[in-house]
Amino acid sequence: MGRRASVTPLSVSALRKSYDGREVVAGLGFELHRGECYGLLGPNGAGKTTTLRCCLGLTAPDSGTIRLAGEPVPQRAREARARIGVVPQFDNLDPDFTAAENLIVYGRYFGLGDAEIRPKIAALMEFAGLAGKEDAGIRTLSGGMKRRLTLARALVNDPDLLVLDEPTTGLDPQARHLIWERLKRLQLQGKTILLTTHFMDEAERLCQRLAIIDDGRMVAEGPPRDLIREHIEPQVVEVYGEDAPDWAGREAKTLARRVELSGETAFCYVDDAAPLLARLGSLPQLSTLHRPANLEDVFLKLTGRELRD
């Protein structure tokens, strides 16, 4: 137990992977601390999925060093994965089994017998907010229920590290908040979490540290509040309406430290919003939203606002 408690959950150094001559992971390195939630953020095509696959031993890297649960990957990926729980981006529950049967069958992949798994089922189902649904068919469950069951399934082997690939995509706010609460509960139990998400509020809420990657390279790493403080002015005034782009071209740069245009919205980044808001108060044709800077502002500044496929 002592060795298990002291092992670094995941460390990655100088990781590289190319496909068809294009380098999709370009020298990436990071390390997870025990008991933390670490976010891996990036636009589509940034290299997140390839990085995860390399870390789990599902894709062989071209070069670099990976240690997962203390084991070298890909050399001993199978042994490492025995101590990992994975919630994939897309649910892959077996529709021919009940909820409880999905947990039992999944546990067998880790060498767990039915006698070991059955006593855990009630607690896992309660944890997922699915108490009483043990005998429910997968086709009868809502999308949120399936997502929560997938999280419960990932806990069957009592993993040290949970790898969550966009765990709340497609869920309604109630289901998202329930999963957030459950993930925080897991951290209190000492679990380490590696999270990928496109929801910046989710990353800001859950992650103690995170990395933003783009084109396979790390462009920033640290606690969310530190990244906001380091990269973005503290206040944001969003100015929108048909006249916003013309107004921004005429006046915004004299009232804001930095201005970004997106469609009919001008994002004005300022240290003190009072002078800008006073001016906008005399322009009723423009609508405004004044707010503190957030992680999404950092993400868009570092990776750009252009659409990624």
Image: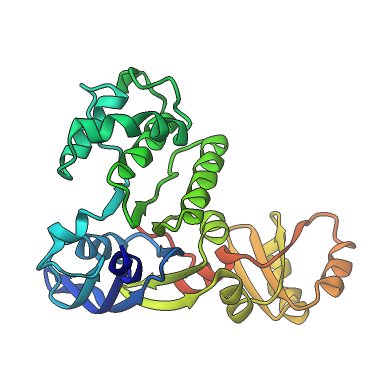
Residue lying furthest front: 2
Q: Where is residue 87 in the image (x, y as percent from the top left)?
A: 32, 46
Query: Quadrant of the image for the C terminus?
Result: bottom left
Q: Does residue 93 appear anywhere in the picture?
A: no
Left or right for 127, reference 151: right
Query: Quadrant of the image for the N terminus?
Result: bottom left
Question: Residue 91, located in which quarter of the rendered image?
Answer: top left
Q: Where is residue 281 in the image (x, y as percent from the top left)?
A: 88, 62
The foreground one among 162 and 221 is: 162
Tell how many labels. 0
Give the color scheme: rainbow, by chain, secondary structure or one colour: rainbow
**Looking at the picture, does residue 278 appear above or below residue 183?**
below
**Looking at the picture, does residue 258 appear above or below residue 38?**
below
The foreground one among 99 and 3 is: 3
Q: Position of residue 6 (x, y in %)?
A: 34, 71
Question: Residue 243, located in which quarter of the rendered image?
Answer: bottom right
Left or right for 49, reference 211: left
Q: Does residue 184 appear anywhere in the picture?
A: yes
Residue occupying image coordinates x 38% and y 23%: 141
